[in-house]
Image: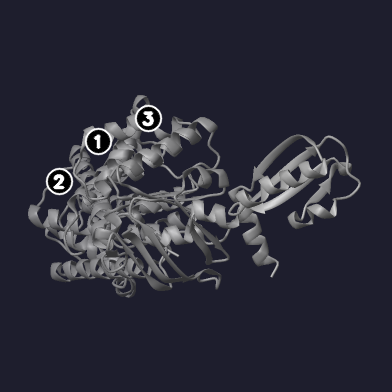
Amino acid sequence: MAAIISISNLTKTYASGHPALKRVDLEIHQGEIFALLGPNGAGKTTLINIVCGIVTPSAGTILAAGHDIQRDYRAARAKIGLVPQELSTDAFESVWATVSFSRGLFGHAPKPAYIEQVLRDLSLWDKRQNRIMTLSGGMKRRVMIAKALAHEPQILFLDEPTAGVDVELRRDMWALVRRLRENGVTIILTTHYIDEAEEMADRIGVIDKGELILVEEKSTLMKKLGKKQLTLNLSEPLAAIPSELGDWHLVLNGGGTELEYTFDAVDERAGIPALLQRMSDLGIRFKDLHTRQSSLEDIFVSLVSDRSGG
Amino acid sequence: MSNLAFNRHSVWAIYKFEMARALRTLFQSIIAPVITTSLYFVVFGAAIGARMTQVDGVPYGAFIVPGLIMLSLFTQSISNASFGIYFPKFTGTIYELLSAPVSFLEIVVAYVGAAASKSIALGLIILATAALFVPVRIQHPLWMIAFLVLTAATFSLFGFIIGIWAKNFEQLQFIPMLIITPLTFLGGAFYSIDMLPPAWRTVTLFNPVVYLISGFRWSFHESADVSVELSLAMTLGFFAVCLAVVGWMFKTGYRLKS
């Protein structure tokens, strides 16, 4: 797939001496939804702000839609829309005025029909004449998205788009992101909510202490690092795990009433039927069973804690 | 679009935004300075001026008109432009400006152009107000307009610098209150520097505001403290210095980018 953003060797050290990014290389594919995960202070926002022109990189190069973001900043920035993390809006302007302003600021002639469409998509149409200061936090968040979309960007950065928004707006936001992707917009989002990345993203990057520690297809990542766990609730408690079941590395829990089998998602087929067959041969019966797949959150926590643990 | 092209939609968007802000705050922007100026005319023009002799052959009330316009022009240009760029920094909306495909020159043209437009309009309104109180004659209307525009643009640019530099509202007020207003009062807004003792006259010539007011007054009354060429050169020089400073600020990202 063609890269719409190519980041190479990107380094940022703030004036305070804090190294926010260390030699980051990353390619974002045209038309994908890319989720950037990482703990607070990992460098997610710095990365976004550099691509958007708000923070100056210390070293490295970035191409956005084929344009160098520093040398050819006009062409690069014209393609990019940004919804920052902080809820920063004007106060006294109307919704319509502020969104139209953004379109003009990004060098486009007015196009009221398009602005209307954006406002309708974001359920802001009824509020178009309202002053921004009179809107709720969730509505202001929508206004910021509308502003970012006002110039029809090909690349959209959403920095923590659903931090502190209610469930309904979160769903709306996810639907909007999918619609944008269908229209060919590439979306890069940062989030604290792993379920958001799991729900939305095609690929996932994990950043920690200024280093990009992993970039994977979401499905590959889940497969590679995801653990599955089968729990069997036994009819009769066992005193110990019979040696015939030693191959499966089972764990006995719940006072001998629960058998737990942990396996890689990859070889799931191999283990379970054989285990059940063997248990049946041994006359160990169970009354219930369930499986659990580790979430992206488990994966993420284990990745980051592995690193901090050494 | 190449980096060198002029992005008129962006400039127009910022300009319109800034002008809309002035219309929303019409009272602060226009009416308050007009009332203040009227009070000056009541006090200095009608009440005290009537008892004063002419200055350089011009009745005192008429003599102070250019100085008063300049006083408002300085303070309003600075406050308009500094607030215009400081406020987005304060609220955080500056992110949009920094991420937009605009050059520093376009940002300056838009913000400074809007601030200067407002203070030029204000200067003309004050002139009209003055004409209600005292007889005003303008000997060189084109020069008058030229000085008005150039001074408004220069001080708007200066205000823009203050707006970028300021870290809080106190700093935003600091330079206009403690430097510009005193320099204006001591720069011959209300008197000809020829009225000063020779030693003070020499000291006064180090005050750049003297040159601005003098040139502007010359366009009204053809009387000047210093030559009109020198006035023009000083104003242009100050403009060039301010433009260079703003250019440096954007190049280095001073207090705009980390």
Marks 1, 2 in one chain? no
Give the amino acid type for the residue marked by disc 1 in the picture.
Tyr
According to the picture, the residue beneath numbered tag 1 turns out to be A114
Please identify the residue farthest to the top as the structure is shown: A126
Q: Residues within 10 Å of mark 1 (few under 14, many from 20)?
A: some
Residue A160 x, y percent position in the rendering: 50, 47
Is A16 displayed left or right of A236 in the figure? left
Measured as percent of width and height from the top left, residue A306 is found at 67, 64
Task: Please name the residue shown 23% across and 58% down the image.
Answer: B106
Check whether the beta carbons of the residues at disc 2 and disc 3 lie within 8 A of each other: no
Q: Which residue is mark 2?
A: B136
- Judged left or right of residue A94, residue A300 is right
Q: Residues within 10 Å of mark 2 (few under 14, many from 20)?
A: some
Secondary element type, mark 1: helix
Which residue lies under the disc numbered 3? A124
Helix, strand or loop at mark 2: loop
Question: How far apart in space, not on screen, are marks 2 and 3 (Cα)?
Answer: 53 Å
Chain letter of the residue beneath label 2 in the structure image: B
